[in-house]
Amino acid sequence: MSTGMVIIGASQAGVQLATSLREGGYDERITLVDGASHEPYQRPPLSKDFLSGVVDAEGLRFRERDYYETNNIVLALGSPAVKVERVGDGGVVMTADGREYPYRRLAFANGAAPRKLEVPGADLDGIFSLRDADDAERLKASFQRTDNVVIIGGGFIGLEVAVNALQQGKTVTVLEAAPRIIGRAVGEETSEWFLQAHRKRGIRIDTDVQITGFHGEQGHVTGVELGDGSVIPAGIVVVGIGVIPRTELAEQLGLEVANGIVVDEYSLASDGQTLAVGDVANIPNPYDRTAEAMPRIRLESVNNAIEQARFAATTVAGTPAPYKSVPWFWSNQGEVKLQMAGLNMGYDRVLIRGDQDADKFAILYYRGDTLLGADCVNSPADFMAIRQALGKGKHLSPEAALSSEPLKKLFSDVVIA
C-alpha cells in the first residue's frame, strides 16, 4: 500500500499545506518536490525589498531547515517533477534527474509560469521575467549596468519593479497594452490615481500600446519597438504580462483543467482524491458577496495560498471544511502602500473616503447597498476595519459610509442580524 503525501511545489501554498497537515496530526511522510534549489522562500518581496537590497536571500526563507527535519518533511529540491503516474491506490512522481517519489495522496502547489511575449527579439539578453529568486538575482545584478529600464505590463509586479528602478536613479518607462494599469485588480478610480501618482514621481507610463519587437546590439536588448514604429531605449526590459498556471502534470492524470486545475470547495480535483492549492487552483469563489458575479476564480495572493492550504489540510485529515474566506491583497510601491479587502466584481457604486491629494484614502465598492470591498491607499486603519468587518459578515450602508466618523467606529455600531 502506498503511503505519504507528495506536494509538487515548495511554494507558499505547498509549505502551508505541509505545515497544516503536521499541525493537524497527519503522521505519514510528506515530501515537497520542487525544481528550485533554494529552500522554500517568500516571493512577494522579490519585486520590492529584495531588489532594493533591504532583504537578502536568507531573509526570504519561510523556516529554518531544522523545522523540516524535525517534522519529517522531506525537501526534494533541485529537479522538477516531469511525470506523474497512478500506481495502485496511489501513484508516483518522477523528477527530471530520475528520482521517484511514491505517494498515497498527491497535491499540486506548483503555481504558475510567466507569460511570454512572442515578438521578434524576445530572446535577446537583458530581457527578464520575475517569478523566482533566480530571476530576481539576475535582474538585481543587471540594474548596475544600465540607465534605461522598460517595464512591459502595468500590473503589481511591473509597478513595484518600476518604483525600485526609479529609486535607483534609472529612467523608467512602463508600457501597458490595456487602457489602464492594474486593471484586473482594482477599480477605475484607483487605477487612475496610481497612473497619475507614478507619472508625478517621474515614471513614464503609456497605455493602449502594442509591442512589435525588440532591438538589440551584440545579442543584448537596446530598445522596445511599438506599434507606431517608435522605439523606447532600453538596457533592461522586464516583462510582466501575467502568468499561466502550471497544469501539465495534472493533465497527465486526466484531471479537469480550465485556467488552472479545477477543484471543489474542499480543494479536491475532478478525481476526488488529488488536491490543488494556491495559484494553480481554479476554485469556487470563497467570497460569498461576489460569488454570484464570479462563481469560480483563480486567486494569485499570499492570503489565498495560506488560507486555502489550511482548509485543504482538513480534507486530508477526514474532517473537510469548505473553503470560505475574505480575500485580501497588498502592493508596496515606494511610499505608496495599497491594501485591498474583498473583491469588487459586480460593483455599481463607488465611495471615496479620505484625501486623494494627500495620498491617503479608501475607495469603497458597492453593489446596491452591499459593500463588496475596498482599495485603501496609505490607510491601514481603514483596511483593517473593512477586512475584519467583511470577515464577520457586517454590512455598512453607503449613507453610513459617508460619515466623517472612523470606519472602525462605524462598523462597531453595526449589529449583525
Image (cartoon, rainbow, N blue to C red):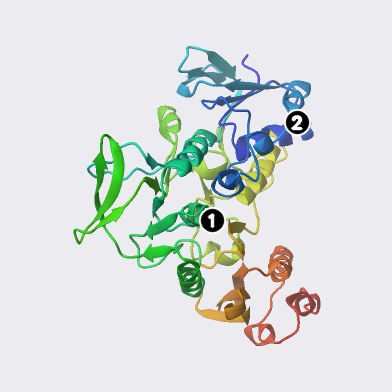
Please tell me whether residue 181 is drawn above or below residue 143 in the rendered image.
below
Picture layout, residue 13 above or below residue 227: above
Relative image position of residue 326 (x, y in whole percent): 65, 59
Q: Which is nearer the N-term, disc 1 or disc 2?
A: 2
Tag 1: residue type? Gln
Q: Position of residue 9 (x, y in %)?
A: 56, 31
Residue closest to the eye, 276 or 303: 303
Q: How many marks?
A: 2
Horizontal arrangement in the rendering, residue 388 relative to residue 155 (left or right) = right
User: On the image, which quarter does residue 20 sit in?
Assistant: top right
Quarter of the image where the C terminus is located: bottom right
Q: Residue at x 59, y 43 (%)?
A: 50
Indicate the position of residue 408 as horizontal and vertical percent values: 77, 74
Residue position marked by numbered label 2 in the rendering: 22
Residue 76 location, quadrant: top right
Q: Nearer the viewer, residue 354 or 86?
A: 354
Nearer the observer, 309 or 36: 36
Residue 198 sits above or below residue 295 on the image? below
Q: Which residue is mark 1?
A: 167
State which quarter of the image contains the N terminus: top right
